[in-house]
Amino acid sequence: MRAISLLGATGSIGMQTLDVIRAHSNAFRLVAFSAGRNIEQARIIIEQFSPKVICVAQKEDAERLQSEYKGRVRIVFGEDGLIEVATVQEADIVVNAVVGSVGLVPTLKAIEAGKTIALANKETLVTAGHLVMKHAAAYGVSILPIDSEHSAIFQCLQGEKQKNVECIILTASGGSFRDRTREQLQHVTVEEALKHPNWSMGAKITIDSATMMNKGLEVIEAHWLFHLPYEQIHVLLHKESIIHSMVQFHDGSVIAQLGTPDMRVPIQYALTYPDRFPLHIERLNLAEVATLHFQKVDMNRFRCLQFAYEAGKIGGTMPTVLNAANEEAVSAFLTGRISFLAIEQYIEQAMNWHVPIAHPDLETIRTVDRETRQYVKSLYM
Ligand SMILES: NC(=O)C1=CN([C@@H]2O[C@H](COP(=O)(O)OP(=O)(O)OC[C@H]3O[C@@H](n4cnc5c(N)ncnc54)[C@H](OP(=O)(O)O)[C@@H]3O)[C@@H](O)[C@H]2O)C=CC1
Ligand SMILES: CC(=O)[C@@H](O)[C@H](O)COP(=O)(O)O
Ligand SMILES: [Mn+2]
């Protein structure tokens, strides 16, 4: 029986993780989880899974819940609460499915506590991949990817030697505006941006897919997870999201992982690794699909992807700035304060404003994250 602590249980990845736990209740049990502000959903999860400890974002919500569940569940809140959930003694695996760089410190603390990390929260690796990977190596902890492309690559690499990898190819759907010109992007709405063609996901990542920043974040995530230079990480447009990513080897062989787009596959693989459990999802029928499409990415059309490659290659605190600027700009777009194209404009301005610091420690990362958010806010407030 594997004991799981789940950060971000009320979100898209969180709820699908609960589906997997429910489907294999003989193999997994939920011992702790975190929610943000969705207290109604938190109550349902408490009733179904009877965890030991849960964390919510706000102190008032924690106090209210604690009086409801007195003597049954310990309720904590804020960043200290997230750390408590991430380090709860009973947990073997911590699934990190919160959105944003708020996931960084709980991940570091979970590593220190010796937990296996199943990582969906890509912002953690983008903002401080060097710290996370160094920490994981020092504490002998595995970081298992949940992001579909990285799970695909991880699966393709099983039994392979790192030295034989020529490059990896991340597939990209192109997001909600794949077929629109830059001219047509000027007046797009939040509602249109939130319609991803293939995946049902949280709001922030859906906007990231539309700007292609999602693929940019994934390039940096892949750099850290698979120890590859940026020159060996490629992106290919593939509108069907059936090939989840590929690895090309020095002998010219290309190994790909395919499947219908369903995040329960990579979530479950991270929880069962190195085993595989049955999963009752729609099977891929290639005869029915008949045709798969591929296209070169136009970096001028998808500027955020270009910014991510640049930030990754500069390194130091520049990926922290890329991530923080993106989080702030996406939040401003989602709340109707800036236009869709202003997202990339503010990220570019933040990267031009920042003087990168090499080999930043955690304190520096946190300072740069905070200052970048203030800088981006100053551009539209
Ligand atoms: N959705 C997907 O299919 C995929 C997602 N990912 C990555 O996984 C992560 C989660 O994505 P997704 O599930 O879509 O996101 P959602 O927005 O659906 O869920 C986010 C979760 O984080 C919680 N949360 C939000 N802000 C805070 C905060 N400040 N403090 C504590 N908890 C917070 C939310 O709580 P509440 O709702 O209660 O407020 C919710 O539980 C992201 O990093 C994303 O990029 C990667 C691949 C695929
Ligand atoms: C499901 C998943 O992993 C997302 O990151 C997905 O890949 C988004 O798709 P695109 O960014 O390719 O549009
Ligand atoms: Mn992905």
Image (spheres, grey):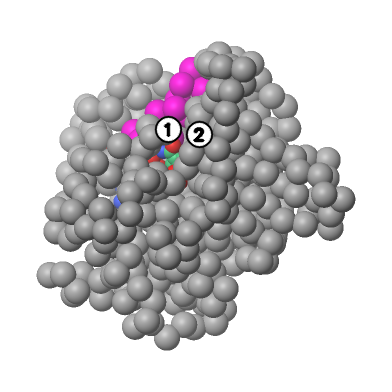
Query: Which amino acid, mark 2?
Result: Glu
Most prominent secondary structure in the magenta stretch? helix
Q: Tag on residue 360?
A: none
Count of labels in the image: 2
How packed mark 2 is, by other alpha carbons closer than 10 Å (few <14, some 14-19, many 20 or more), is many
Label 2: which residue? 240
Query: Which amino acid, mark 1?
Result: Asn
The residue located at (68%, 61%) in the rendering is 232
Q: Is residue 328 above or below residue 159?
A: below
Quarter of the picture containing the C terminus is bottom left
Nearest the viewer among 77 and 263 is 263
Q: Earlier in the sequence, mark 1 or mark 2?
A: 1
The residue located at (30%, 22%) in the rendering is 44
The answer to whether the residue labelled 1 contacts the one labelled 2, judged by CB atoms less than 8 Å apart, is yes
Label 1: which residue? 198
* Label 2: which secondary element: loop
How packed mark 1 is, by other alpha carbons closer than 10 Å (few <14, some 14-19, many 20 or more), is some
Q: Is mark 1 within 8 Å of ligand 2?
A: yes
* Label 1: which secondary element: loop
Give the magenta part as a residue range.
7-22
The residue located at (34%, 24%) in the rendering is 46
Q: Position of residue 33 (x, y in %)?
A: 41, 35
Q: Magenta includes 137?
A: no
Any part of residue 114 in sight: no
The residue located at (49%, 72%) in the rendering is 311
Q: Nearer the viewer, mark 1 or mark 2?
A: 2
Q: Position of residue 314 (x, y in %)?
A: 54, 77
